[in-house]
Amino acid sequence: DQQVKQNSPSLSVQEGRISILNCDYTNSMFDYFLWYKKYPAEGPTFLISISSIKDKNEDGRFTVFLNKSAKHLSLHIVPSQPGDSAVYFCAASTPNSGNTPLVFGKGTRLSVIA
Amino acid sequence: NAGVMQNPRHLVRRRGQEARLRCSPMKGHSHVYWYRQLPEEGLKFMVYLQKENIIDESGMPKERFSAEFPKEGPSILRIQQVVRGDSAAYFCASSPPGVTGGSEQYFGPGTRLTVT
């Protein structure tokens, strides 16, 4: 059973426009959410995170929104750049001294077209 | 400030051989996680270790797989008698100790295991 779901396997966006990547989860115990970016043949790189006590976290061009009642989060990238083209993974964890394994979605491949 | 190091980056084994994957966490990090990624899939948790302790191995197959994180040296993921289905990318991640409320994990570049 997929506890973290990224229903769009791919997304294409024009350079300069907004990219919106979505993620849904089923486990209401999840309390901390992260987005990772992955290039081919490399490990995932941490992008941004959000705790369930917040509904928004912003870092430069990246903003994550959390809707706990809908068990939904999204990553907004604006403006999108060609270098943003990668696979984006949503991940979640449960609070347990903070160091707990992550549960990942299957990823969304973002292509930013120049 | 070196990141998480994994070696080898690529490993080819014949069916029935043993595979040993190594991971050195970031400096100051005492928590190590191993994940496996099959083609077109997300990363799946295998095992979580601290120095000399396995904290959670709920994601690890019961047979043929083992992991350790000794007092000195890297963490090792060991796969005995490999089969074709073990072919995957294996990623190690580390995080600092004593974090509350959630913590980022930092990933290594992965080891791509191919079983022929």
Image (spheres, rainbow, N blue to C red):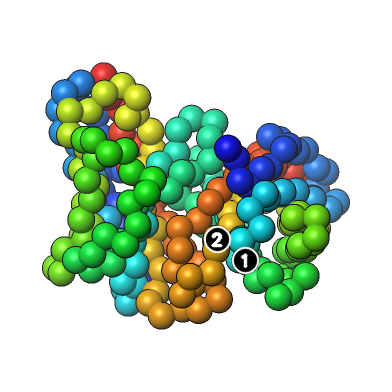
Residue at the image position 39 percent from the left and 45 percent from the top: B59
Where residue B86 appears, as percent x and y from the top left, is 32, 29
Q: Is residue B93 above or below residue A104?
A: below
Where residue A101 appears, as percent x and y from the top left, is 45, 58
The mark found on residue A93 in the picture is: 2
Q: Which chain does tag 2 point to? A: A
Q: Is residue A76 visible to us here?
A: no
Residue at the image position 31 percent from the left and 71 percent from the top: B30
Residue at the image position 53 percent from the left and 35 percent from the top: B41
The mark found on residue B47 in the picture is: none
Where residue A66 appears, as percent x and y from the top left, is 76, 63
Q: Which chain does tag 1 point to? A: A
Disc 1 marks a residue whose amino acid type is Asp
- Report the side of B43 relative to A69 (left or right): left
Q: Are marks 1 and 2 in contact (CB under 8 Å)?
A: yes
Residue at the image position 22 percent from the left and 45 percent from the top: B66
- Report the side of B107 relative to A8 (left or right): left
Q: Which residue is mark 1?
A: A31
Which badge, 1 or 2, is on the more N-terminal residue?
A: 1
- Report the side of A30 relative to A19 (left or right): left
Q: Is residue A75 visible to us here?
A: yes
